[in-house]
Image (spheres, helix red, strand yellow):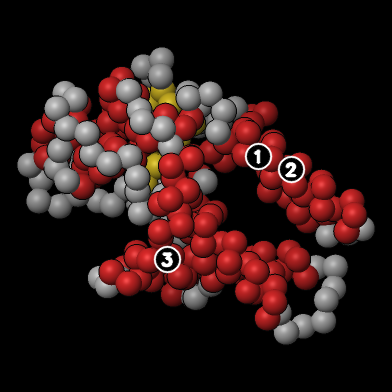
Amino acid sequence: MLLHADQSAGLPRMGGMARADGVVIASENFWAFARRDGSLSEGTMPSPPAVVRRVPLLRGLVRLGLSLAPLARGTGVARARERLFLLAALLAPLSLVFLPHWVSLPLGIATAALLLVWLLRGRTLFLHGAEHRAIAAAESRELVSTWLAAAKPTRFSPRCGTNFAALVLPVSLLAGHLWPLPAEAYTPFAVSLLSLALTMELWQLVQASRYRVARAFLLPGLALQRLTTREPSDEETRIALTAVASVLRRELA
């Protein structure tokens, strides 16, 4: 399958997600989760309605939510307890807005720290690098040579969620500063949603731009990937390549 993909003229754009026990690779239509124990789970990606794709801001939020589909569904990528923890971490900011600032601030920091520890536990950092390397191998048509460890494409990715997170912070600060309505209990939540939507629009523009100056927006995230990725072993890279092969097998069928 990797050889066939290397010889194909066009391959779908792919993204991924590193887990402590494996790597998720997803295209617009399919996803695959290759685990360290050699098992493999496969599924299809949900697609937003056509009308939603044409609505600015809303389309970004929907796309961001759908990218978590392999985690949210009962597909074996995340256990039930993990899904509950992730849901609680995402909904926690809603409850914090009703608490005094001196309480909400430390609770918010603690929630973010717990979520970060959960996301980066185990071999996640190494498998994160493997995810990037496998996708880069597909884009440079070096899948077979990467499997054989003859090539080692970059472990840094311009489409990594780390880059998106690095963009969210300045956009959130700017949105909070320019918020035109009187401050209410719902304001932090509204600003957060608006910031995510605006960042997704900016993210799409940067990804689609052919101008190098637009890529300057990605530099903070690429620098941050030195902390969120580690150099993967050949075995870890093959785990990610197994997931890539699963997605491409169905895309190219």
Q: CA distance from mark 3 to mark 1?
A: 25 Å
Q: CA distance from mark 3 to mark 2?
A: 27 Å
Q: Which residue is mark 1?
A: 115
Kindly state the secondary structure of the residue where label 1 is placed: helix
Residue placed most toward the observer, 249 or 139: 139
Q: Residue at x 85, y 53 (%)?
A: 104
Q: Which labelled disc corresponds to residue 215?
A: none
Q: Which labelled disc corresponds to residue 111?
A: 2
Q: Earlier in the sequence, mark 3 or mark 2?
A: 2
Mark 1 crowd level (few <14, some 14–19, many ≥20, 10 Å Cα): some
- Residue type indicated by callout 3: Phe
Q: Residue at x 78, y 56 (%)?
A: 94
Q: Which labelled disc corresponds to residue 217?
A: 3
Q: Residue at x 32, y 23 (%)?
A: 233
Residue located farthest toward the left when viewing the structure as drawn: 7
Residue located farthest toward the bottom when viewing the structure as drawn: 180
| Marks 3,1: beta carbons within 8 A | no
Asked if residue 246 can be seen in this view, the reply is no
